[in-house]
Image (cartoon, grey):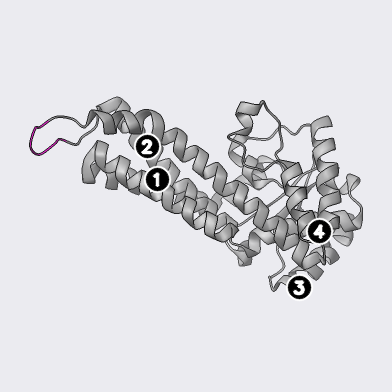
Amino acid sequence: MNAVKTVLLLGLLSALLLVGGEAVAGRNGLYIGFLVALVMNFASYFFSDKIALAMYSAQPVSETENPEIYRRVGPIVANLTSRMGLPMPKLWAIPEDSPNAFATGRNPSHASVAVTGGLLSLMDDRELEGVLAHELGHVKNRDILISSIAATIAAAITMIARMAMFFGGGRRDDDEGDNNILGMLFMMIVAPIAALLIQMAISRTREYGADASAAQYTGGPYGLVSALQKLETYSKRIPMDASPATAHMFIIQPFTGSALLRLFSTHPSTEQRIARLMAMR
């Protein structure tokens, strides 16, 4: 069901891009805006993992680097990847007291999983397994690729909206020679907000999918449920200084906000996630 929702949301984003872009900038303007966004997100797809890991000063974890962390995390990840049919990802530790974790990398063969020091201190082994299974669920479900596609389309919509704002749109009606004012206003005001909301909805859908994968490959939802309950409490006590651009990567929203800001949240509420997990019993 989550996969169907993702496809529908991506289709809605694509339709928004094609209809709005054609209305404002004509076919040539649409092609240019989409091409620029595609190149920008192509680079992001291949290098965003390195950027994100460097942004949070992540340190490699292996038998020779941070061996104490590896002795705890390595066997859990190795066991999970064996069950899930995935290659062993690179492991990283983030020197951060706020408990959190994320996965990155363009495909399962180039995946990385990073955990904060706060997460390792807070979780017991069962809860840690649930968190790591969630992150590996993102890898198995190709969520990074899906997020890149959504970001590409959303960026193209935003770019065309800016073209309309600064250049007044490029399409002329063949019969009357007038600008399509309604289409231009739609792209300037409504389309970027709609694109952002749809992109966030896709991210929330993928979180549910990763939660389900974690429950499936750990034998039940209880480890992840317990981990999410702790994360919800302690992430508020020790907020993380995270970039909004990378918020969607973490297992739990690294910062909180008002009810209006939650509309643009990349994550479902923890209560909703736990309710869905418990329904899987």
Residue at mark 1: 37
State the residue at coordinates (80%, 41%).
95
CA distance for labels 2 and 1? 8 Å
Q: Is residue 256 magenta?
A: no
Q: Which contiguous range is marked in magenta?
A: 172-177
Q: Amino acid at mark 2?
A: Met
Q: Is residue 176 magenta?
A: yes
Determine the secondary structure under disc 2. helix
Instruction: Tell me the number on the disc at residue 221.
Output: 4
Comparing labels 1 and 3, the label whose residue is closer to the camera:
3
CA distance for labels 1 and 3? 37 Å
Q: Quadrant of the N terminus?
A: bottom right
Whichever of labels 4 and 1 marks the residue nearer the N terminus, that label is 1
Q: How many marks?
A: 4
Q: Amino acid at mark 3?
A: Arg
Q: Marks 2 and 1: CB-CB under 8 Å?
A: yes
Residue 199 lies, in percent from the top left, at 52, 44
Q: Label 4 neighbourhood size at 10 Å, few (<14), some (14-19), many (20+)?
A: many
Determine the secondary structure under disc 4. loop
The quadrant in which residue 177 appears is top left
Res 111 seen here: no
Is residue 59 toward the left or the right of residue 186 in the image? Answer: right
Residue at mark 2: 159
Residue at mark 3: 83
